[in-house]
DNA sequence: TTTTTGATTGCATACGTATTCACTCAAAAT
DNA sequence: ATTTTGAGTGAATACGTATGCAATCAAAAA
């Protein structure tokens, strides 16, 4: 069927007058082989244009040195940033990144099943929910799971998140300090731990402080849904004076709608706050107040987990990092006098 | 070293009372095997939790069904969009996407060398220049190359681009029709075919029409460089009344600087035009006039090429697709009366 | 009834590398 | 001079699958 011809270790061995084992050893750091022999073999290999077949190596060693990375929504710059960092960090760690679309329209992709059969060192899910089916399948395929920006109660998976409770409470406090009277929460994907934690902490902090129950709309972490949600909020007679959006993408959609469809002065008439601190948030057009997730550290922790899970597949860990509030112009910080 | 234990075809064979070949055939569509035998084997396999080892399969067949995708700058939404489309299309085609960072600070990554040893079906470079060294290396590794959004004179590579000459000329004509007197061109990465074609066509069309030679600044296709370039242009005594930026990212940087640092009314006092038609371009804040590159079709063509190159590694092709001008508010279309 | 056909199946081997084991031989220790 | 040591090497085998080849056997053709 296939007629591609490659130079193998056998060929090099023949040409160099040694055994195939010797060639293998010449390319294995720390293997027992004489200085001169190695030099000679390397030279011959170079001359013949030999390259070790990584598939064969992986098959032999039982691991592919590849990490599967499932991503849900690349329209979210936070995940693009993460993916970028991840590709570099994994690269530095000598691991290859197998990217696959994790869900299309909410349903998990079929390809994820096939991916697992590559003897992956680990599976990283970027903001993708973990079904128990998938967890079970990974267990059987002996592929450790690391959730990024999601948690789970499943003990068979690790996770790396930032402290959503603290973040949401900090934002609630910031809004109260700004003297906002009518606050709204724009929720992300229902059922995601990320949204659940932010929503829960936001509502409970407001309630603890004796503030009114916030309005609630669903934006699914996505631009279009968030635009629609914003319209519903702003069309109300008792229009809110502050919206906390569960991520930056929705916040930017909200700003666009508020400013260009309702002519509102965002930051004065209406405060809008996001979550993530995406690069765009700092652009002057948006100047978005938001809660920064430490992407670089989150990625570092993720890669560390992947490494740790190599030896001990069951050494699962749930990492929670601290973020920080970034105040910009889209929210007012001090109470305004009534007009 | 490694103690992971997997169920192999051998195990299934023993359990089902058949040979290993039979098991293999049971999982190979179109193989000669009896209906009942197959059913029995599949059932046994299911029961034991058997999954075929794709590494072994790839080693045997000589191709990994993986495609390497090298990406330079994920800060550019056009490539994010492309990556997104690509991940779905490749998936549908039964191919896996091996993502790797193609260049860090201008220099190609070392990992690209290692990637090639995975018996890739093809290597796709997203807006990354092809050095002759790399081309040679791919030739030896027998991995066909497809350049996306770049061309090359190298006959060992295919390419998919949109017609940059037509695009740039169309924009030049649009600016002239708008009565602009002092036009500037903000260049992308020097030495890239993409920039070369746009620059060449833009300049030559203006010159053919008897317009003045445009100003030239370099923005490297990147936001920060573009902001700096915009400042240099707008600080001039003979400030331009139009800037054609060689991509959307730079155009948006230019809008931000013009509007928030120089207080200019973009679209009236200063026309700014981009290239790509990134999702952001249509946001009301920017309302960017730009030239649309047909990402979906470009990706389809790319995947088609990857398929075609399977059998005939030398059947290289250079595909050029048509784009279209998208006029929005950031440029004026009609001549304005002098104030 | 004999021959032909064609569908199933197992055996053996290939894919290309890493690694264990046993062996050789020179240097060091006794 | 003899034993011990240890470095260096090759032969053999394992990793898990796919497939060419030959063998088997029942059905169909003669």
Image (spheres, coloured by chain):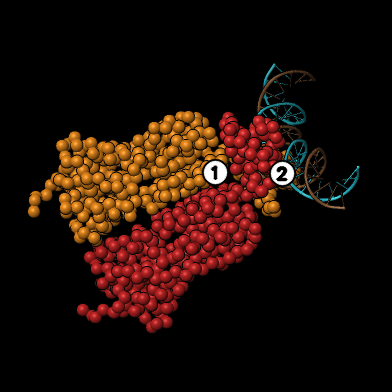
Chain colours: A red, B orange, C brown, D cyan
Asked if residue B73 lies left or right of residue B226, the reply is right
* Residue located beneath label 1 in the image: B114
Q: Are marks 1 and 2 on the same chain?
A: yes
Q: For numbered disc 2, what is the local secondary structure? A: helix
Look at the numbered disc 1 and give the secondary structure of its residue.
helix
Q: Mark 1 or mark 2, which is nearer to you?
A: 1
- The answer to which quarter of the image holds residue B127 is top left
- Look at 17% across and 46% down and name the residue there: B182
Q: Nearer the viewer, residue B302 or B137?
A: B137
Residue density around tag 1, few if under 14, some if 14–19, many if 20 or more, within 10 Å? some
Displayed quadrant of residue A334: bottom left
- Separation of residues labelled 1 and 2 (CA atoms): 32 Å
Q: Is residue B111 visible?
A: yes
- Residue under mark 2: which chain is it in? B
Q: Is residue B97 above or below residue A210?
A: above
Where residue B15 sits: x, y (%)?
74, 47
Q: At 33% from the left edge and 48% from the top edge, which residue is drawn? A: B220
Q: Is residue A213 left or right of residue B306?
A: left
Label placed on residue B10: 2
Q: How far from the left and from the top, in percent, is residue A150?
A: 50, 64
Residue B51 in the image: state x and y as whole percent. 63, 48
Q: Are marks 1 and 2 in contact (CB under 8 Å)?
A: no
Residue most extreme to the bottom: A210
């Amino acid at each position: 069927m296939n007629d591609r011809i490659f130079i193998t270790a056998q060929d090099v061995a023949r040409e160099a007058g040694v055994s195939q084992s010797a060639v293998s050893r010449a390319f294995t750091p720390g293997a027992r082989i004489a200085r001169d022999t190695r030099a000679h073999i390397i030279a011959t290999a170079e001359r013949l244009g030999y390259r070790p077949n990584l598939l064969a190596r992986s098959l032999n060693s039982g691991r592919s040195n590849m990490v599967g990375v499932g991503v849900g929504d690349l329209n979210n710059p936070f995940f693009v940033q993460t993916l970028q960092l991840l590709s570099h960090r994994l690269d530095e760690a000598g691991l290859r990144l197998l990217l696959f679309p994790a869900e299309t329209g909410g349903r998990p992709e079929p390809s994820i099943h096939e991916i697992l059969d590559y003897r992956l060192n680990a599976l990283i899910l970027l903001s993708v929910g973990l079904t128990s089916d998938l967890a079970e399948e990974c267990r059987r395929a002996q592929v450790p799971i690391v959730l990024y920006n999601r948690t789970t109660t499943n003990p068979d998976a690790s996770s790396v998140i930032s402290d959503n409770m603290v973040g949401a409470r900090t934002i609630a406090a910031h809004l109260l300090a700004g003297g906002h009277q009518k606050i709204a929460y724009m929720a992300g994907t229902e059922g995601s731990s990320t949204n659940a934690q932010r929503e829960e902490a936001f509502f409970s902090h407001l309630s603890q402080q004796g503030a009114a129950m916030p309005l609630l709309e669903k934006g699914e972490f996505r631009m279009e849904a968030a635009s629609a949600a914003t319209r519903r909020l702003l069309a109300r007679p008792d229009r809110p004076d502050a919206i906390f959006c569960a991520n930056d993408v929705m916040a930017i959609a909200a700003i666009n709608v508020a400013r260009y469809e309702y002519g509102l002065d965002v930051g004065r008439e209406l405060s809008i706050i996001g979550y993530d601190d995406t690069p765009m948030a700092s652009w002057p057009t948006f100047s978005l107040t938001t809660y920064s997730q430490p992407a670089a550290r989150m990625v570092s922790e993720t890669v560390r987990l992947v490494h740790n899970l190599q030896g001990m597949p069951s050494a699962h860990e749930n990492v929670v990092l601290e973020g920080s509030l970034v105040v910009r112009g889209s929210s007012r910080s001090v109470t305004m006098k009534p007009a």
